[in-house]
Structure formats: structure tokens, C-alpha cells
Amino acid sequence: MRVAGRATTAAEAARIGNEVETLYTNGPAGGGGAFKSTREVIAVQSVLLPRAAVTPSFSFVEA
């Protein structure tokens, strides 16, 4: 069994891992190789915005 969770803080993510770990120790027999880890995920998501919500602009920056 694989379990994944999403949380807004590292502490919440650790709580998810602790809860899943109890399934390993108190769940059905025959499990093995269980481990828990947390990692930060940074993602890019495409969205659509109403045209009125966007103000086009540009600027030049000299190096």
C-alpha cells in the first residue's frame, strides 16, 4: 500500500506520516520496508484569468 498526502506546513505533513506509520504497526500482518518522508513541492499551474483582470505592461532593465 502507498499513501500520499498534501499539507500546508511541514508539521502537518509529519502528522500524516505518523498516522500512516501506525497503520504499518497496527495493520495487517506481512508488511515490510515501510518508511516515511516529507518534501517540499513547488509546482507551476496554468490558469485562465478574465481579460479585465490583466493589465499588460513592459519595462526595460539595463544590465
Image: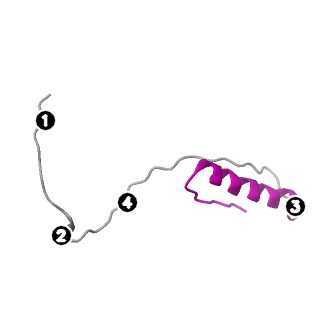
Graded by Cα atoms within 10 Å as few (under 14), some (14 to 19) or many (20 or more), the crowding at tag 3 reads: few
**Alpha-carbon distance for marks 4 and 1?**
27 Å
**Alpha-carbon distance for marks 3 and 4?**
38 Å
Would you say the residues marked 2 and 4 are in contact, meaning their CB atoms lie under 8 Å apart?
no
Please name the residue that numbered disc 4 is placed on: 45
Element assignment for label 2: helix
Q: Which mark is residue 61?
A: 1
**Alpha-carbon distance for marks 2 and 1?**
26 Å
Instruction: Tell me: 34 left or right of 3.
Output: right
Q: Which mark is residue 5?
A: none
**Alpha-carbon distance for marks 2 and 4?**
18 Å
Would you say the residues marked 3 and 4 are in contact, meaning their CB atoms lie under 8 Å apart?
no
Q: Toward which corner of the image does residue 23 lie, by quadrant? A: bottom right
Residue at (60%, 48%) from the top-left corner?
10
Disc nearer the start of the sequence (3/4): 3
Disc nearer the start of the sequence (3/2): 3
> Residue 4, image x and y in percent?
63, 59
Q: Quadrant of the N terminus?
A: bottom right
User: Which residue type does callout 2 highlight?
Assistant: Arg
Is residue 41 a member of the stretch shown in magenta?
no
User: Which residue type does callout 1 highlight?
Assistant: Val
Would you say the residues marked 3 and 2 are in contact, meaning their CB atoms lie under 8 Å apart?
no
Graded by Cα atoms within 10 Å as few (under 14), some (14 to 19) or many (20 or more), the crowding at tag 2 reads: few
Residue at (50%, 50%) from the top-left corner?
41
Q: Which mark is residue 51?
A: 2
Q: Which residues make up the magenta segment?
A: 1-27
Please name the residue that numbered disc 3 is placed on: 26
Q: Is residue 6 depicted above or below 37 in this figure?
A: below
